[in-house]
Image (cartoon, rainbow, N blue to C red):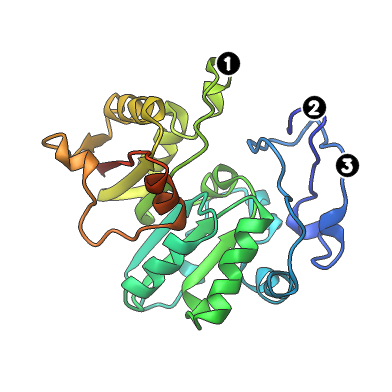
Amino acid sequence: MTPRGEPYIPPLKRINYRSDLRIIKKAPPSEKRRIYGRRLGRPLNPARQKAIDELLPRLSYLEEVLQHSTPFDPRTDFSPTTEKLICEIGFGDGDHLAGMMHQYDDKTAFIGAEPYINGMSAFLKQLQEENLDQRRIKVWMDDAIRLLEKFTDHCLDAIYVLNPDPWPKARHHKRRIISQENLDLFARLLKPGADLIMTTDVDDLAAWMVTEASNHPDFLWTAKSRLDWRELPKDWIKTKYELKGKAAGRQQTYLLFKRH
């Protein structure tokens, strides 16, 4: 359910990728979405629209997967030689996700969830321009939790949640993606020893995420000293958002947890 007065974009299965993204109507009361705010911002330029038209129908999960009565294994969507599956939730413009596709070999596949079409179109355009292997990526332009709830146990090797919306007002804290309920889900999906990586440049949110994850019985914080959450992790991929925040004087916090 979107806040009162905000637009609602129909689910993917009803979208005409060239025109229907401009349709605005009220969300039905039964929708179990946890997306707040506008999913469509500034109009897409021709290159981004082309990327949406050509790639989104092929690379996206269909809405029908939510109707599965039993969980499905997302690894079956990739090559049998795939050894590792990484999920990034809320990937923004996708520069970190694309960076991981460059960094890892072809035995690693990715799932990226981003509800906002401007971010999704930026990532898909980058896929085309950088000639990245589209067989190694599936995307979802909706609430990530709705999709992840349908996955089988212990199917993921890592989950990234980078710079999520801080929802600074106390009455909105329940909207924060890092919660005991969602951590229960992440713990079910992650293999033992797998990584949960979170970042933020909002100190209050950093404290919230540390507290929530540290209080969860299935996650262990790997930090040994203050430097561990202030310094860049090894082989870290910097994003435009991160660099912009640093230029504005904001300090990024890096939170690395292990699944027991």
Question: How far from the left and from the top, in percent, is residue 220?
Answer: 21, 36
The one nearer the camera, 43 or 147, is 43
In this figure, which residue is indicated by the disc labeled 2?
Answer: 4
Residue 195, position in %: x, y? Answer: 28, 49
Badge 1 density bin: few <14, some 14–19, many ≥20, Cα 10 Å: few
Circle 3: residue type: Lys
- The residue at the far left in this view is 224
Q: Can residue 122 be seen in this view?
A: yes
Q: Earlier in the sequence, mark 2 or mark 1?
A: 2
Q: What residue type is labelled 2?
A: Arg
Q: Name the residue under label 1.
A: 171
User: For mark 3, does the 10 Å Cα neighbourhood hold few (<14), some (14 to 19), or many (20 or more) residues?
Assistant: few
In the rendered structure, find residue 25 and report the number of the disc placed on it.
Answer: 3
Q: Which residue occupies the foreground of this view, 202 or 54? A: 202
- Of callouts 3 and 2, the N-terminal one: 2
The location of residue 257, given as percent across then percent down, is 26, 41
